[in-house]
Image (cartoon, rainbow, N blue to C red):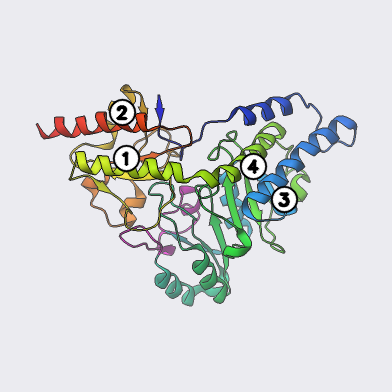
Amino acid sequence: MAYFDHNATAPVSSEVAEAVATALKTYGNPSSVHAEGRVARAAVEEARAQVAQLVGAKPENVIFTSGATEANNQALRGCGRPQVLASAIEHPSVLEVAPDDDRIPVSADGVTDLDALSEMLKRRGRFVVVSVMAANNESGVIQPVKPAAERAHSAGALFHCDAVQAVGRIPFDMERLGADMATISAHKIGGPKDVGALILAEGMEVERFVHGGGQERRHRGGTENVAGIAGFGVAAKQAAERRLTIGRIANLIGLLERRAEAAVPEAVVFGEDVPRIANTSLIALPGVDAETQIMALDLAGVSVSAGSACSSGKVAESHVLEAMGVDSALSRCAIRISLGFENTVEEVDKFIEVWSGLAKRAAS
C-alpha cells in the first residue's frame, strides 16, 4: 500500500512500538510508591519531558489525556470562560463546544480572518476563550496563531491552539506564539492511539474534566496509560528530530501537485497560494466525487481520505471547504493527501496514474 493518510494517523515506528512493549511489561501503578510503581512513574515523567520539549513548555504543565478530542474539551470547558470564539475550520471537538454564531470566518484560501476576530472580541472581550488551530487538518493551511493570540490577549481573552497537525511539521513554541493552552495527539506523530496532551502556559489552570482521582497533578482522574504515554514520548522526540528533514516531504507534495495539475488542468488545489504544512494537499477532481476516488485508489493500493477522519468512516461534505466558500459540487470532489517520511516518488507516480485515469474515464 501507498499510505497517503498521515493526517488521520501516522505509522508507528519500531522505536515507539518497542517503548510501548517495554512499558506493558512494567506492571506497577505509577501512583504506587513501591519499586514497581516508581519504574512506571519514571516512564510517564520521561515522556512528559519529551512532549514538553516538543512544544516549548515545562513538563509540569503537560496533562496527559485520552487524545486531543478530550484535551480540546477540557481546555475550552475548563478554562473558566463561558464563551468560545473558534475559527470556522476547527476540528469538530472544538466546533461542537462553540455556538454557530461564535465562529470566526476564514478567507477563500482558508486563513482565519483576524479583523473579524477583533470585531467579535469587541462585543465579548474578557468573557471569552479564542481557539485557532496551528494548521488545518484538511487543507494544511497554516493559521496566524501569534497575531490571533495577541488580539485575544489585548481584549482580555484567553487563547487556545489545537496544534495536532502542526507539531513535527512546523516550529511550534507555546511561549513564543502566546498560547495559554495547546493540545496535541500522539497518533498524529507516529505514537499510539488514545493518548494526547493538554499543555498549559505557566500560571494557567483548568478544571479537571475526568473526575475520580488525583492523577496528573489533580487535572485528570484515572490511572495513567503508561504504555501509551511511553510511546507518545518517543514519538514526540522523533517528531522534533524529523522536522529538520521535512523538506523531502515538501518536495514530494510539490511534485504530486504539479503532476496532478499537468495531467488534469481542471484540478483544484485548495490553499495553494498561502503557506501550508509540508505534507498536506487538499485537491478536487471536478466531476468525480470523493468516495469514488477513495475507493478506486484503495483498490489500486493507495490510501487517501476525504477531510477529517473523525466522522465514523463516512465521506461527508467538508465544513472546512464550506467555510472557505467553495461550491458544494466541487467540495464533494475533494480528497486529502497527507504524506509521511516513508513515502516515495514511485508511490506518487502510482497515485497520479490511478487518479488521472479516473479523470479520463469521467471525461469519456
Q: On residue 256, which mark appears? A: 1
Query: Would you say 141 lies left or right of 191 here?
Result: left
Give the residue type at disc 2.
Lys
Q: Earlier in the sequence, mark 4 or mark 1?
A: 4
The mark nearer the N terminus, 4 or 3, is: 3
Circles 2 and 1: CB distance less than 8 Å? no
Dot 1: few (<14), some (14–19), or many (≥20) neighbours within 10 Å? Answer: many
Q: CA distance from mark 1 to mark 3?
A: 44 Å
Tag 2 or tag 4, which sits nearer the N-term? 4
Q: Which residue is mark 3?
A: 219
Image check: 334 left or right of 175? left
Distance, label 4 to label 2, CA atoms, is 32 Å
Segment colored magenta: 88-112
Q: In the rendered structure, which amino acid carries the disc numbered 3?
A: His
User: How would you rate the neighbour count of disc 4 (Cα within 10 Å): few for under 14, some for 14-19, many for 20 or more?
Assistant: some
Identify which amino acid the numbered label 4 is placed on.
Lys
Q: Position of residue 260 (x, y in %)?
A: 25, 40
Q: Nearer the viewer, mark 4 or mark 3?
A: 4
Mark positioned earlier in the residue sequence (1 or 3): 3
Q: Residues within 10 Å of mark 3 (few under 14, many from 20)?
A: many
| Proximity of marks 1 and 3: CB atoms separated by less than 8 Å | no
Cα gap from disc 2 to disc 1, whole angstroms = 10 Å
Work out whether mark 2 precedes mark 1 in sequence or the reverse, and give the earlier one.
Answer: 1
Q: Name the kind of residue labelled 1 in the image.
A: Leu
In the image, which disc is placed on residue 237? 4
Q: Quadrant of residue 27?
A: top right
Gap between marks 4 and 3 measured at Cα: 24 Å
- Asked whether 315 falls inside the magenta stretch, the response is no
* Percent x, y of residue 49: 72, 47
Q: Is residue 270 above or below residue 304?
A: below
Give residue 316's position: percent from left, percent from top.
Answer: 33, 40
Q: Where is mark 2, residue-wise? A: 350
